[in-house]
Amino acid sequence: MSAGRTARERVRAELIREITEIARRQLATAGAAGLSLRAVAREMGMVSSAIYRYFPSRDDLLTALIIDGYNAVGEAVERADAKAGEGDFAGRWLAVCRAVRAWALAHPHEYALLYGSPVPGYKAPQDTVPAAMRDTVVLARIITAAHAAGALEPAGPRPPVPPSLAEDFARARTMLPMDVPDDVIARAFTAWAGLYGTVSFELFGQFNNVIEDRAAYFDHSMTLLGRLVGLKA
């Protein structure tokens, strides 16, 4: 019986893998809003009722795709950080940024699902949060380690952090390994938003006919953002 259950589990895992692969192709042709369980079932040669055993609704399938996507970004970021020198905080930051860009360029439709326009009628459940935070946790570790090592040297004067953000940043500390002052959190979040904003501008065409050497511009921009945080080469 144990062997039988294992075989059934393998079959179920393979079907789920096939369903999600077909759904990812649908993202490229129909977009997230056009994702259809019935269309997936037709491509697999299944009756539509059978697919609901694996994903009871379109939203469940979207959630699975979103979690897979966030985990893929997180894994790419974690690998890039692990390969960089532990004490080279600026190098780790740039490696992480490059990993995000490389993944986005290789998986544009999945990136759009994660960071593009919201899908009408869909609200991501809490199940997506741990996967969504994997890349941010890496940033938090880099910044916290640099701060602990006395290696953060932000350039130029900085405006004071508005007191109204104190509660938000306190909440951030409960979610992230970020034992640093509010000013450091503010700069880190600004850099992280700048990373994804720059990737999105490139991926969604805002740089067309403006920036030709995208890789050079990206590295320069990420270096500037790193300097904002206080990371120096």
Image: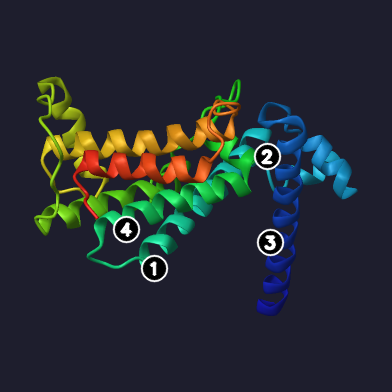
Position of 107 with respect to 78 (left or right) is right
Among numbered discs 1 and 4, the one appearing first in the sequence: 1
Among numbered discs 2 and 4, the one appearing first in the sequence: 2
Q: How far apart are labels 2 and 4 at the CA level? A: 44 Å
Q: How crowded is mark 1: few (under 14 residues within 10 Å), some or many (20 or more)?
A: few
* Residue drawn at point x = 82 percent, y = 36 percent: 38
Which label sits in the foreground, 1 or 3?
A: 1
Q: How crowded is mark 2: few (under 14 residues within 10 Å), some or many (20 or more)?
A: few
Label 4 secondary element: helix
Q: Mark 1 points at which residue?
A: 83
Q: How far apart are labels 4 and 3 at the CA level? A: 38 Å
Q: How far apart are labels 1 and 4 at the CA level? A: 10 Å
Q: How crowded is mark 4: few (under 14 residues within 10 Å), some or many (20 or more)?
A: some
The quadrant in which residue 148 appears is bottom left
Among numbered discs 4 and 3, the one appearing first in the sequence: 3
Name the amino acid, label 3.
Ala
The answer to whether one can see residue 47 in this image is no
Q: How crowded is mark 3: few (under 14 residues within 10 Å), some or many (20 or more)?
A: few
Label 1 secondary element: helix
Q: Where is residue 164 in the image (x, y as percent from the top left)?
A: 14, 20
Q: Mark 4 points at which residue?
A: 91
Position of 219 with respect to 112 (left or right) is left
Q: How far apart are labels 2 and 1 at the CA level? A: 40 Å
Label 2 secondary element: loop
Q: Where is residue 196 in the image (x, y as percent from the top left)?
A: 44, 37
Check whether the beta carbons of the residues at disc 2 and disc 4 lie within 8 A of each other.
no
Which label sits in the foreground, 2 or 3?
A: 3
